[in-house]
Image (cartoon, rainbow, N blue to C red):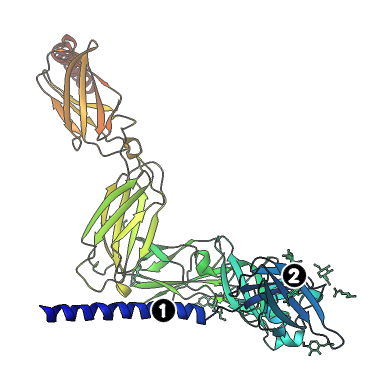
Amino acid sequence: MWVFMERSLATVWAFLLGAGLTLAFSVATTKNVPQSLQLLGCVFIPRSNVTCHWTPGDNQATYYTLKAEKMLRSKNLTFSCTTTGLSCTAGINGSGLRFTFCISVISHSISGNVSSKIRCQSARIEGKLAPVSLNSVRQVDGSPHCLSVSWTSNVTHFPLAPFEIERGELNSQIKFTAEGEVNAQVRNVSVTGYTFQVCLFKPYTSYTLEIRNRYLGEASPWSEWSNPFQGRTAEAAPSAAPALWREVGPIGRNGRRLISLLWKPLPRFMANGRVTFYNVTCRAENGLTLSDYGSCGKLQPETTSCSLPLPAGRCSCSLTASTSAGTSPKALVWISGSSEKEPPPPAELTATPLGDDSVKIRWRPPPDLSVSGFVVEWVAVREETSSVLHWEKLNSSSTKLIITEGVKTMERNAISVKALYGEQGAGGNITLHVYTQEGTPSAGPDVRVEHISETSVELSWSPVPVEQLHGFIRSYALVCTTRNQLARSVTVPGDLHRYTLENMSPGIYDIFIRASTVAGTGPAGNPANVHIGSEEISIVICIIVPLLLMSLVSILILLLAQMRV
Ligand SMILES: *[C@@H]1O[C@H](CO)[C@@H](O)[C@H](O)[C@H]1NC(C)=O
Ligand SMILES: *[C@@H]1O[C@H](CO)[C@@H](O)[C@H](O)[C@H]1NC(C)=O
Ligand SMILES: *[C@@H]1O[C@H](CO)[C@@H](O)[C@H](O)[C@H]1NC(C)=O
Ligand SMILES: *[C@@H]1O[C@H](CO)[C@@H](O)[C@H](O)[C@H]1NC(C)=O
Ligand SMILES: *[C@@H]1O[C@H](CO)[C@@H](O)[C@H](O)[C@H]1NC(C)=O
Ligand SMILES: *[C@@H]1O[C@H](CO)[C@@H](O)[C@H](O)[C@H]1NC(C)=O
Ligand SMILES: *[C@@H]1O[C@H](CO)[C@@H](O)[C@H](O)[C@H]1NC(C)=O
Ligand SMILES: *[C@@H]1O[C@H](CO)[C@@H](O)[C@H](O)[C@H]1NC(C)=O
Ligand SMILES: *[C@@H]1O[C@H](CO)[C@@H](O)[C@H](O)[C@H]1NC(C)=O
C-alpha cells in the first residue's frame, strides 16, 4: 500500500514538473523570436506615386513612416508618407521608373524608433506599366491560325526601350473573344517588338483582342488592358468534306438512270472561309467514260444539289468544296448497280415524338458487320404537293437521331433508315409513318353508292387526302338519317373502304361518313341520298323497265321489216 502511494506521488510530481517546463519554454519562444518590421513590397506608378506594404514589428508603434529615396548622382531625393496603418502612398514628384529607389519603413513608438532593412532596386521591378494602345490587328497570309498585332506606348510612361523589349524584358498576355462567343480567353504571349504574331486562332474568324504587360516577372503588377482591337484570321482550306447523299431515279429507255446528288453546306467552323465553288465528279466503275455531266461539274457556292444520268452499273460520285485557300477532302457516295442484290436494311426502327416538332428515332444495326454508316431520310407525306426530302448521314456506330428539321405537328412523316455498305452502296430501307402529334381530320370521305337492293345498300368511299387527315384513321362512322332523324350509325375499322348496310327498312336516307383519329372525329364528307324499297324504285323496276324493253323490241322489228322491203 505504502509503496504504491510513494510511486503515484512520484508520478504526479514528474507530471507537474513536465507541465511547468513546457509552459516556461513556450513563453520563452514567443519572447525570444521577435517579429521584425518588414517591407513586403511596393507598386510604382510611373510619374505619379509609390505604394508600399509592410508587416508590423513587435513594439507598439504609434505610427509608421515610409521613406522612398531616389538615388541620383548629384543628390538623393527623399519622398515619404506617414500612416498608422500598414501601407501608404508617397508621391514621387513626377519621376520615371528608370531609377534606383531605396525604400525603408520606420516604426515610431514610445520606446523609440525602429527601421526596417533598407532595400535598393530599380523602380521598374515593381513598376506598373501604363496600358499600351493597339493600332492594328491583321491576318497573316498563309497562316490562317495567326494574327499580326501592332501596338504603341506612351514613351514618358513606359520605362522600356525598344532594345529591352527585343531582349524579352516584357511579360505579356493577350485577351481574345471570337465573334459570337461571350467568354474571353487569356493566354501568355511573347512580345519582342512593336509588331508581333500570335498563332492560337481559328481560321477565318473575327477576334477582338486586348493586351497587357508587366516588367519581367511577378514583382511587377499587370498593366491595365489596352484598348480592344478587332481583326480576322485568313481563310484556310475547308477541314472536312460536305455531307453527300443521292437519290436514284428509275432506269430510262436509254439504259441510264437519273441520279440527283444532294449535299449540305459546311458549317462555318469547318468551311474555314467563303466557299467559292463545289466540284462534283462521277465515274462508272466498269470504266465507261461519262460524257453527260447533267447539271453537275463545277458549281456555284449557293448550289446544294445537281443531277446527271448515270449508267445502270455501279457508280461513284465525289464532291469537294473550295475556298480561296484550298480544297476540302473528298466526299464520296457509292451508287450500287441496279441489278445488284440490295444488302439488308437495319433490323428495327422505333420513333418517339419529343414535342410538337421533333421526333427521336432509334434503330438496330443489321446483323451484317460491314456497315459503314447510316442514312436517315424523311419527308412530309403529301398527295397534292411535293415535299422536300430531308436527310442526315451518320457514322456506323450511330443508332439514334433526333429529327427537328421539317417536322410539323399534325403532319404525317415517312421516316426511313438505310445502312451504307461502303462500295456496295446503300442497303434496303426500313420505314415508319409518324406524327409528332395527331389532330382530328379536317374533312370526311365522300360516300359513293355501289349497289342498292330492296333491303340493303352497298357503300364505298375513298380515303381522305393525307393532308386533311392529321392522324392515322382509327375508324369511320357511317351515319344514316331519314327525315332528319338518326336511323342508324355504324362504326367500321379505319382500313375498310366498303360496307353494306343490311336490313334497311324502306325509306329515303341521307348517308354520310366521318373519319376518326386518336385525337377525335372530323366532319362528314358529302352525303349520299338513297331510296330503299320505295315505290319509285318498284315502279322503275316493275313497269318502266319492261315498257322500255318492249318499245325497243318493237322498234327493232319495225327496222328489220323496213330493211326487208
Ligand atoms: C497614385 O497615382 C495614381 C495615378 O496617378 C492614382 O490613380 C492613384 O490614386 C494614386 N494613389 C494614391 C493612393 O494617391
Ligand atoms: C545617396 O545615398 C547613398 C546611400 O545612402 C549614399 O551612398 C550617397 O552618398 C548619397 N548621395 C548623395 C549625393 O547624398
Ligand atoms: C520636384 O521636381 C522638381 C523638378 O523636377 C524639383 O525642382 C523639385 O525640387 C522636386 N521636389 C522635391 C520635393 O523633390
Ligand atoms: C523618432 O523619429 C521621430 C520622427 O522622425 C523623431 O522626431 C524622433 O526624435 C525620433 N526619436 C528618436 C528617439 O530618435
Ligand atoms: C502620355 O501620357 C500622359 C498622361 O496620360 C499625357 O499627358 C501625355 O500627353 C502622353 N504622351 C504621349 C506622347 O502620348
Ligand atoms: C503564364 O505564364 C506564367 C509563368 O510565366 C504561368 O504561371 C501562368 O500560369 C501562365 N498563364 C497562362 C494563362 O498560361
Ligand atoms: C474537279 O475534280 C476533278 C476530279 O478530282 C478534277 O480533275 C478537276 O480538276 C476538278 N475541277 C476543278 C475546277 O477543280
Ligand atoms: C459517331 O458519331 C457520334 C455522334 O456524331 C460521335 O459521338 C461518335 O464519336 C462517332 N463515332 C465514330 C467512330 O466516329
Ligand atoms: C423504301 O423501300 C421501298 C421498297 O423497296 C421503296 O418503295 C421506297 O421508295 C423506299 N423508300 C425510300 C425512302 O428509299
Residue 76 lies in what quarter of the image? Answer: bottom right
Disc 2, ligand 1: is the CB inside 8 Å? no
Q: Would residue 49 be visible to someone looking at this image?
A: no
- Amino acid at dot 2: Cys
Report the residue at 50% width, 63% height from top. 265
Q: Secondary structure at mark 1?
A: helix
Say what amino acid the circle numbered 1 marks.
Ala
Residue at screen point 70% across, 77% down: 127
The image quadrant that residue 114 belongs to is bottom right
Q: How many marks?
A: 2
The residue shown at (32%, 73%) is 422
Q: Is residue 23 above or below residue 62?
A: below
Name the residue carrying label 1: 24
* Residue at left offset 36%, top offset 50%: 379
- Which mark identifies residue 81? 2
The front one of 309 and 535 is 309
Q: Nearer the viewer, residue 313 or 542?
A: 313
Of the pair 134 and 226, the residue shown nearer to us: 226
Q: Position of residue 4 (x, y in %)?
A: 13, 79
Which of the two marks, 2 or 1, is nearer to us in this view? 1
Say above or below: 540 vs 191. Answer: above
Is 96 situated left or right of 196 in this image?
A: right
| Residue 543 visible in the snapshot | yes
> How far apart are labels 2 and 1 at the CA level?
41 Å
- Other residues around mark 1 within 10 Å, as few (<14) / some (14–19) / many (≥20): few
- Considering the image in quadrants, where does the N terminus appear? bottom left
- Give the x, y percent position of residue 225: 67, 68
SS assignment at label 2: strand
**Tags 2 and 1 touching, CB below 8 Å:** no
Residue 260 position within the rendered picture, expressed as x and y whole percent measured from the top left: 42, 62
Q: Which mark is residue 36?
A: none
